[in-house]
């Protein structure tokens, strides 16, 4: 492979695209701040067992998608495939729970999964997500869902559906598990190979299979909602009621189990109908067991993550966002003029103007052409005679009007 070829499943985010990323990050961070969420940045790699124990050995992520390597100190290291395990680790290690109340955190960054690359699926991709730790009230579930829908709305995205389910408590799932084994066993030979394996190890995961035949069989599988004990049912009913109170519509999807093992009770996804096969833009739910499973004091928690590449694909389908342009394009010619332009440009920037300085040294005609293409409203011109007379020319690129002013009065003439 050529060394000037990015690794399969990775992508450069080029300047023309970065504007969408910045818009997304700014929109989300403003909404997080309004709800009192604070940003946390955890390392991109962690000890492998953190993910094995946190996410679950029988999941696709741990089973086949992790970027794991042995470092020079013989430690097994994994590039984070998702954000929650690292945040949970940090929460325990730094005793963030010591405040005694709830902790509201958000994060944004690169994640790594060894998957088959396709539109909306990469090996290095980005997630923005939040975690609300320390509360088990259904109001917490609804708060985080409402923040997700607020962000998507503020981005201007349409054609989204919130799908909602409960995966119950650990005990509920024990009972449900047997019902699934009983249901799937007669179809065993028709299931995809992974699902055959899951039948004994983790039958719930069969519901998450992407195999079409398996999905057809799973369509008639028993519903987890029939296996919820009272407490779980109450929690789920309250979440549904409160969502309606906020005017957030949802669809029940009893087949929704999510790809990671740590979820309890509420599970949800937000799906776009404008994305083809990779349609889930946000996935999340409650994970009351994770903190204790990692060795911390039992702490209920709920959170979600959005796939940023998929959001960008949607944003690009909406109106095009324009990259920011300079206020002033500054052209100069001759050594004295060029040096002086460097000084004046710097002063103008300190005075708050966005200034692009032409560094090509080409003739004025060529520099004027670039000024026209730059998107700036104003072109400043400095040549030998201007240096001599301590003046500068101001050209309005919209009207082509041109005037000569003294350098001293430049700022006055610009505002
Ligand atoms: P999928 O079913 O699409 O594989 P998942 O259940 O594995 O998703 P999560 O672990 O819930 O995904 O991650 C949350 C979100 O992150 C997904 O809904 C998706 O938008 C995004 N995402 C996950 N994997 C990738 C990837 N390889 N490339 C780009 N985005 C991804
Ligand atoms: Mg996946």
Image (cartoon, rainbow, N blue to C red):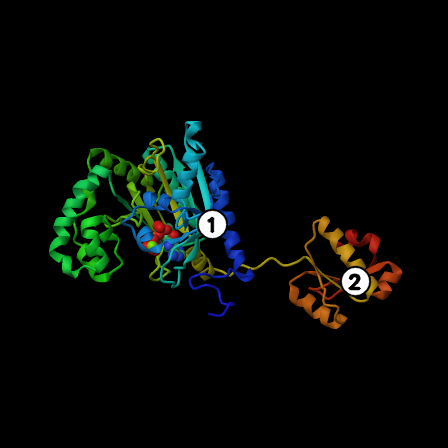
In this orientation, does residue 197 appear? yes
Which is in the foreground here, disc 1 or disc 2?
1
* Residue ID at (76%, 70%): 364
Q: Is residue 327 left or right of residue 121?
A: right
Q: Is residue 209 left or right of residue 407?
A: left
Q: Residues within 10 Å of mark 1 (few under 14, many from 20)?
A: some
Q: Is residue 172 left or right of residue 411?
A: left
Residue 345 vs residue 406, the one in the foreground: 345
* Residue ID at (70%, 64%): 397
Q: Residues within 10 Å of mark 2 (few under 14, many from 20)?
A: many
Earlier in the chain: of badge 1 and badge 2, it is: 1
Provide the residue designation for mark 2: 338
* Residue ID at (21%, 49%): 201
- The image shows residue 152 at horizontal and vertical percentages of 42, 50
In this orientation, does residue 161 appear? no
Label 1 sits on a secondary structure element that is: strand
Provide the residue designation for mark 1: 109
């Amino acid at each position: 492979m050529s060394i000037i070829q990015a690794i399969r499943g990775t992508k450069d985010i080029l300047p023309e695209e970065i504007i969408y990323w910045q818009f997304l990050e700014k929109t989300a961070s403003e909404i997080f701040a309004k709800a009192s969420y604070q940003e946390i940045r955890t390392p991109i790699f962690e000890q492998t067992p953190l993910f094995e124990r946190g996410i679950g050995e029988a999941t696709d992520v741990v089973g086949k998608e992790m970027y794991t390597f042995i470092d020079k100190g013989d430690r097994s290291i994994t590039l984070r495939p998702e954000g929650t395990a690292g945040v949970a680790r940090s929460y325990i290690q730094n005793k963030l729970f010591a405040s005694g109340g709830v902790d509201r955190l958000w994060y944004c960054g690169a994640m790594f999964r060894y998957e088959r690359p396709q539109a909306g699926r990469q090996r290095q991709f980005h997630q923005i997500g939040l975690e609300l730790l320390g509360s088990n009230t259904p109001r917490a579930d609804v708060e985080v869902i409402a923040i997700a829908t607020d962000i998507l709305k503020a981005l201007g995205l349409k054609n989204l559906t919130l799908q909602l389910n409960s995966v119950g408590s650990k005990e509920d799932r024990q009972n449900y598990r047997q019902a699934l084994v009983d249901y799937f066993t007669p179809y065993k030979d028709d299931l995809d190979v992974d699902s055959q394996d899951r039948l004994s190890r983790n039958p719930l995961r069969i519901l998450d299979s992407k195999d079409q035949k398996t999905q057809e069989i799973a369509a008639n599988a028993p519903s987890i909602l029939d296996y919820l004990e009272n407490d779980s049912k109450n929690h789920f009913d309250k979440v549904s009621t409160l969502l309606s109170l906020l005017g957030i519509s949802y669809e029940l999807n009893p087949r929704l189990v999510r790809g990671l093992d740590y979820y309890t009770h509420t599970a949800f996804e937000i799906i776009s109908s404008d994305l083809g096969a990779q349609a889930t833009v946000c996935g999340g739910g409650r994970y009351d067991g994770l903190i204790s499973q990692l060795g911390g004091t039992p702490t209920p928690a709920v959170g979600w993550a959005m796939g940023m590449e998929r959001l960008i694909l949607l944003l690009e389908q909406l109106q095009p966002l324009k990259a920011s342009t300079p206020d002033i394009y500054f052209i100069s010619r001759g050594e004295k003029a060029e040096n002086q332009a460097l000084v004046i440009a710097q002063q103008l920037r300190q005075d708050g103007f966005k200034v692009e300085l032409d560094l090509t040294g080409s003739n004025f005609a060529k520099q004027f052409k670039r000024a026209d293409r730059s998107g700036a409203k104003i072109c400043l011109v400095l040549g030998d005679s201007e240096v001599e007379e301590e003046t500068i020319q101001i050209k309005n690129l919209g009207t082509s009007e041109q005037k000569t002013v003294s350098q001293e009065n430049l700022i006055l003439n610009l505002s």
